[in-house]
Image (tube, grey):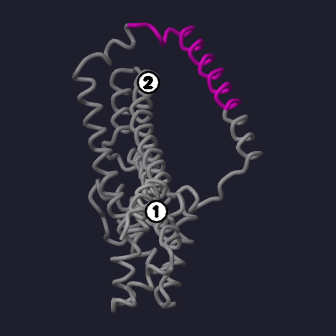
Amino acid sequence: MSAPSSRLLFDEPGPRARRRIRVATVLSVLAGAALLALALQKFADNGQLAADRWRPYGTWPMWRYLLEGLWSTLQAAAVSIALAAAAGIVLALGRVSPSRWLRLPSAAYVEIVRTIPALLLVYIVLFALPRYGVDLPLFWKLVVPLSVSNAAAFAEIFRAGIRSVERGQLEAGLALGLTRGRAMRTVVLPQAARRVLPSLVSQSAGLLKDTSLGFVVSYAELLYSGKVLANFNHLLIQTYLVIALIYLVINASLAKLARTLEARQRNRPYRAAARAVPAAAQPG
């Protein structure tokens, strides 16, 4: 029976911890509601909630411009996720390899890169590399540092998934005559990826938010487009609130997807057991 993916990276909280989490959640919601009410009151006092200041966001040209920025954000996020996930798989396989020549460099990469902020990597690509003749296109000045940074996180997720797969799966592949590397790729890794899929979705959502660092390199992602738009129409608060709403909808959708996948994985062993009982009861 496979363990739920939520237990791969941390222990399941007990009854007392769950009560504390519920109390903290209620207090956080109440505090957030109070701050929101205070902010709305301040906005109203300064005329920021007037209809004429929000009317431009009911027009198609305004939304077309923001959607173009959102499309650039999604492109950068998709490429970064693909590269980071591919690198993460390689690093995870290296970390669980019996060869120290693969295990030690992989571990060093993960431990070092996890301590470096993604913004610092953006600055390195933006300012340091051009001095040595490496001047990447604008798109890659954002994608490369995000991929390098998130590859370490993806590697740890995949490694947790690999460790969660029963050792007998690898031994069965070896008994069939597969090499260790092929058994890991064709037997263990697919099961590991399926188990950590919710965590992969959550990490992808975090990477999508990190694309807002594109304003540093002047890449026309959503946040940078909002900055340009606010400088043009002088509706700073309205513009950034609309952008925050767009990010909220996207990340809430990804969070919902992660919870749905986790719930399906949690129920899969019970569905499999339910199917197995009638089959076992059949004669012969």
* Residue 159 image point, x, y percent: 50, 71
The answer to which of 256 and 247 lies nearer the viewer is 256
- Residue 272 to residue 102: above or below: above
Relative height, residue 83 to residue 257 (above, below): below
From which residue to which does the magenta span run? Answer: 26-51
- As helix, strand or loop, the secondary structure at mark 1 comes to helix
Res. 149 mark: 1
Give the side of residue 212 with respect to residue 110, left or right: left
Q: Amino acid at mark 1?
A: Ser
Q: Residue furthest front?
A: 283
Which quadrant of the figure contains the C terminus?
bottom left
Does the stretch in magenta take in 71? Answer: no
Location of residue 24 in the rendering, given as x and y in whole percent from the top left corner: 71, 36
The residue to which callout 2 is attached is 236
Name the residue: 26% across, 58% down.
137
The quarter holding residue 36 reads: top right
Image quarter of residue 245: top left
